[in-house]
Image (cartoon, rainbow, N blue to C red):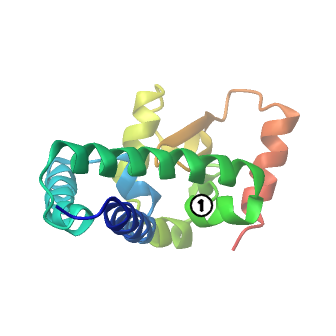
Amino acid sequence: MVPWWEIVLRTAVVYIAVLVLLRIAGKRELGQMSAVDLVVILVISNAVQNAMTGGDNSLVGGILAASVLVGMNLLFGRIANRVPYLAHLFSSEPTLLVDEGKLVEKHLERENVSREDIEMSAREHGLDDLKDVRAAILERDGSISIIPMQLGATQRTQRRIRQLRNRP
């Protein structure tokens, strides 16, 4: 049986490594999982299981590893809420994809979002044409928010769109 402290340490290292890998994958990949993405996640979880428990297949070892994962997730969430710099490491800022009906190509490319993805989100909001989209924003969770042209944007929304326009 593997010592408890080794399971805790291994699990923490694996958690951080997988978090970094998912962060590199980008927020769009996390927001819209396809069947292939689900298979990759399942295979990753199977691949890292032994790395976390060190071959300890006992009930206690599994519960300990799961507890460490949940605990680290809660801890990182609390840290991210209190330390803005670290919050940026765990999740990225929203990205403007459509501005006044026009695609922001450099943001689409950087975030790996296709025109079809945006058109699908626009249709979900009852819009047939991107010219009817005041703004499309890729949110932190990978979803795409649509603000229609006809909707009078609040001052707060207008200010947020201006902030997103000024981002590189």
As rendered, which of 140 and 132 lies closer to the eye? 140
Against 8, residue 141 (above or below) is above
**In the image, is 30 to the left or to the right of 150?**
left
Q: Quadrant of residue 19?
A: bottom left
Which quadrant holds the N terminus? bottom left
Which one is nearer the viewer's eye here, 18 or 25? 18
Q: Is residue 93 left or right of residue 12?
A: right
- Left/right placement of residue 158 relative to residue 94 reads right
| Left or right of residue 57: residue 90 | right
The residue depicted at 31 percent of the width and 52 percent of the height is 65
Tell me the residue at 19%/60% (across/down): 49
Badge 1 local density, few (<14 within 10 Å), some, or many (20+)? some
Where does the image place residue 94, in percent across and percent down from the top left?
A: 62, 54
Q: Position of residue 95 (x, y in %)?
A: 61, 58
Q: Residue at x 55, y 39 (%)?
A: 145
Residue at 23% x, 44% y is 60
Residue at image mark 1: 92
Q: Is residue 121 above or below residue 102?
A: above
Task: Decide which of 73, 11 is in the foreground and name it.
Answer: 11
Amino acid carrying label 1: it is Ser
- Residue 99: image x %, image y %? 65, 54
- Residue 54 visible somewhere in the drawing: yes
| Occupied quadrant, residue 55 | bottom left
Q: Can residue 138 be seen at all in this image of the molecule?
A: no
Q: Secondary structure at mark 1?
A: loop
Judge by depth and name the residue closer to the eye, 148 or 15. Answer: 15
Rendered image quadrant of residue 151: top right
The C terminus, quarter of image: bottom right
Q: How many marks?
A: 1
Outermost residue toward the right?
155
The image shows residue 85 at horizontal and vertical percentages of 74, 66
